[in-house]
Amino acid sequence: MKVIHKDNPDFQTEEYRKIFLDGTHNTRELGGYKTTDGKKVKWGVLYRSDKLSDLSTDDQEYLSSLGIKNVIDFRSSNEKSEDPDLIPDGMRYIQLPIEADGAIRPKVEAMMRGQDQGDLGELLVEANAEFVSKYKGVYKDFLETLANEQKPSLFHCTAGKDRAGFAAAITLLAVGVPMETVINDYMKTNEYTKEFVDDYLKKIKLYSLNQADVDQLRPIMGVEERFIIAAMDRIVEDYGSIENFIAEGLEIDDETLGKLKNFLLEES
């Protein structure tokens, strides 16, 4: 069902949070989340997703009908070259590249040959911590874009779970959504992509002539709470609190934060 959340309160529920598209597996609305001061995120202003390179014509028309004006792409130049986004007419395409973890691919290739690679999830633990230490400038630009543009936006990476997952987390935390809610949203990736991941791992098993231990691969195909917690722990270690990270690490001043809240929030 292709729903327009902002126009129909009946669809403003968890049941309808996922956006069903032919060409993506992990697209969702971020509206409705309540803040600690009694407000909530507006429906119809912020969406997160995996890559948009496989959108059908119907998908593009649906995204246009949602009123999305900006598409923000966190993928590296190589990723974008291999799978360029299909951007509907009338949307601005904004590139804020974060390099994918190059350590993962050789380990996956070795695993395909039957070599034990241990806990691949540890690579994503470190990658999430590096969002805090290495990519502050990107996430500063992201929050400032949302605050200054004041336009309905969709942001994404390749799988829509790590780079986009941290972007969603830091945005929601910045406007006062509690950590428990943020982690619950982060973990929805596993629910939304389960069918796709299960099918993909079956193909990996087949193509590797049963050499690949797909249980080793599964952690990096989804999310685990330890991934996002690694980022939060790095924030507390380096800045003392989320608030300090927003103000000092990302250099988001009070005026910009106020504009971000004005754009994203409404009375509950």
Image (cartoon, grey):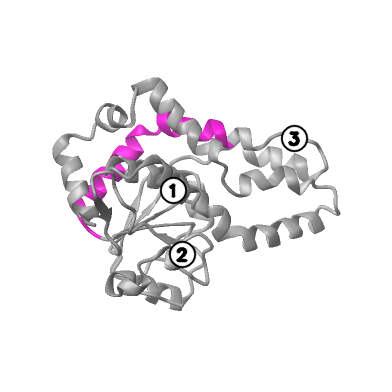
Q: Residue at x 85, y 48 (%)?
A: 211
Circle 1 is placed at which residue position? 164
Q: Position of residue 155 (x, y in %)?
A: 38, 54
The amino acid sitting under disc 2 is Lys
Choose mark 3 or mark 2, whichever is in front: 2
Q: Main secondary structure of the magenta part?
A: helix
Please tell me which residue lies in front, 34 or 1.
34
Q: How crowded is mark 2: few (under 14 residues within 10 Å), some or many (20 or more)?
A: many
Q: Position of residue 227 (x, y in %)?
A: 53, 37
Could you tell me if residue 6 is visible in this image?
A: yes
Q: Where is residue 226 in the image (x, y as percent from the top left)?
A: 55, 36
Mark sitting earlier along the chain (3/1): 3
Please tell me which residue lies in front, 93 or 68.
68
Quarter that holds the C terminus: bottom left
SS type, badge 2? loop
Q: What stretch is highlighted in magenta?
A: 124-151
Mark sitting earlier along the chain (1/2): 2
Q: How crowded is mark 3: few (under 14 residues within 10 Å), some or many (20 or more)?
A: some
Q: Distance between the residues labelled 3 and 2?
A: 33 Å
SS type, badge 3? loop
Circle 2 is placed at which residue position? 18
Res. 206 image quadrant:
bottom right
Circle 3 is placed at which residue position? 117
Residue 172 drawn above or below residue 44: above
Could you tell me if residue 75 is visible in this image?
A: no
